[in-house]
Amino acid sequence: MGEVRVRLKKSLSGASGLLKLDVAFNLPAGSFTILGGPSGAGKTSILRMIAGLLKPENGEIYVGEQCWYDSKKGIYLKAQKRLQGFVFQDYALFPQMTIAQNLEFAASASQNRAKLQERISQILEMMDLTSLLNRKASSLSGGQQQRVALARAIIRKPPLLLLDEPFAALDPEMRKKMQEYLLKLHREFKLTTLMVSHDQGESINLADTIMMLSEGKIVNQGSPEEVFAHSNLSGKFRFTGEVLSIQASDVVFVVSILVGKNMVKVIVDKNEIDQLSPGDHVMLVSKAFNPIIKKIS
Amino acid sequence: MNRLKGNIHSIETKDQLSLVKVEVKESILSTIIVNRPEELDYLRKGNEVYVLFKETEVVLGLPELTGISLQNRLLCKVIDLEKGALLCRVNLNHPSGQLVSIVTRRAVEELDIQAGSQIMAFIKTNEMMLSE
């Protein structure tokens, strides 16, 4: 599929006056990028321009060798020709159609029926949707509908998956499940994903790269740890890891964290324990004064 | 993690280390960090910062205690205590904010710390972190 290269300029009228959107970024093939920043910064507009739902004033969008938009060359592909997956906060399924019909409808442009069926069943299985196949979309819960919307978005093998706060309306537990499904799909189908999210935990769990947007410009860009933690904490002993377990011990909690191949344990006060659960990606920080060095050879 | 808001009062730098004093309500806290002011943009006199330190690094002592190297002293009032079998979690109130100290239960009993007691919270200079 190849790298996605984006350069966009457009003046937008937002809630707080005129916004001059001016961004340039590349999304490497297979990467997961989260676009963050305050409301009204232009995040959704960027997604809409890439999708072909909003026309930029100038710039270019290339997906591998394929040109979707180039103002200098006068190229502007319509949304239908761009073949990307798009998932919004509202699910936009056809309520009276069954799940199977919703998915087949999305795939109707594709030619090879047998291959398509195989792909559909693979996606349904990965997303635990097989049992819901004959249910009407309108009878599903919010989380189920959003799972179908996600499945529908990737049925056509999009070279680029665009997600606009897809899980914002879901409760925290469901959101976490959806993140797991999304990561599974992203990895299995080697998708290139660009997602708008306000949620810092979500960004840390999902993204390789975070771009922070403010007033139409990218003001900060980097890995989650660079963007969220490295910038302002003075502690020098830093690692990222994944929470494996949390155990109450007397009046404190022992949190086991996998850092690289090693498991470490950290004592945590109850004030912070509510924000942690197994599977969370976290940063461990201590001062350069604390560790003891012991030679092993 | 305890977190108190203050303003940078002074910065003293030697080689890779800086001793940063932060004025919080009714106290000046000092922290030593491995940073020079040119490496950390918020390290400027007068800037608003947070000092961060872990609950388990807060030492408790009687208010009249003297002759001790600990530079950071916060005279607090005990809000309440949560006694475990081995440890005790002490909730403290200081004019600059609330903080928590986790010490052994034995220490709490020896010092006879109770809700409402006046107590001095001590934190080592090298246990304090800074954040914007």
Image (cartoon, coloured by chain):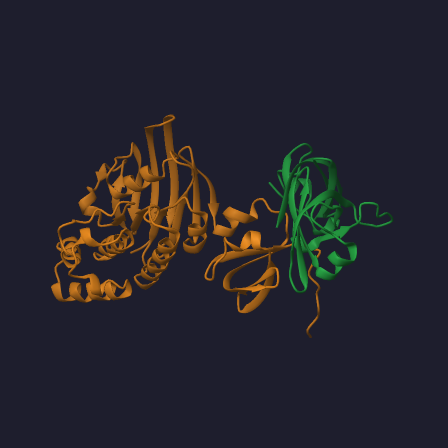
Vertical comparison of B27 with B1: above or below: above
* Residue B14 location, quadrant: top right
On screen, residue A291 versus residue A115, left or right, reads right
Location of residue A42 by image quarter: top left
User: Where residue A171 sits in the image (x, y, percent)?
Assistant: 36, 50
Q: Residue at x 56, y 68 (%)?
A: A263
Res. B51 in view: no
Q: Colour of chain B?
A: green
Between residue B29 and residue A283, name the one nearer to us: B29
A39 sits to left or right of A248: left
Query: Looking at the image, which residue is at 52% across and 49% down?
Result: A226
Instruction: From the rendered image, report the letter of the chain displayed in orange.
Output: A
Taking depth in this image into account, of B102 and A107 the one nearest to the observer is: B102
Q: Is residue B76 visible?
A: yes
- Residue A121, image x and y in percent? 20, 66
Residue at the spot 27% in from the left edge and 36% down from the top edge = A71
Residue in the image at 34% along x and 62% along y: A184
Q: How many marks?
A: 0
Judged left or right of residue A254, residue A97 is: left
Q: Position of residue B84 (x, y in %)?
A: 64, 61
Q: Position of residue B100 (x, y in %)?
A: 65, 50
Q: Quadrant of the N terminus of chain A?
A: bottom left
Task: From the viewer's side, name the closer residue of B70 and A49.
Answer: B70
Q: Residue furthest bottom?
A: A297
- Asked if residue B41 lies left or right of residue A206, the reply is right
Residue A297 versus residue B30 in the image, above or below: below
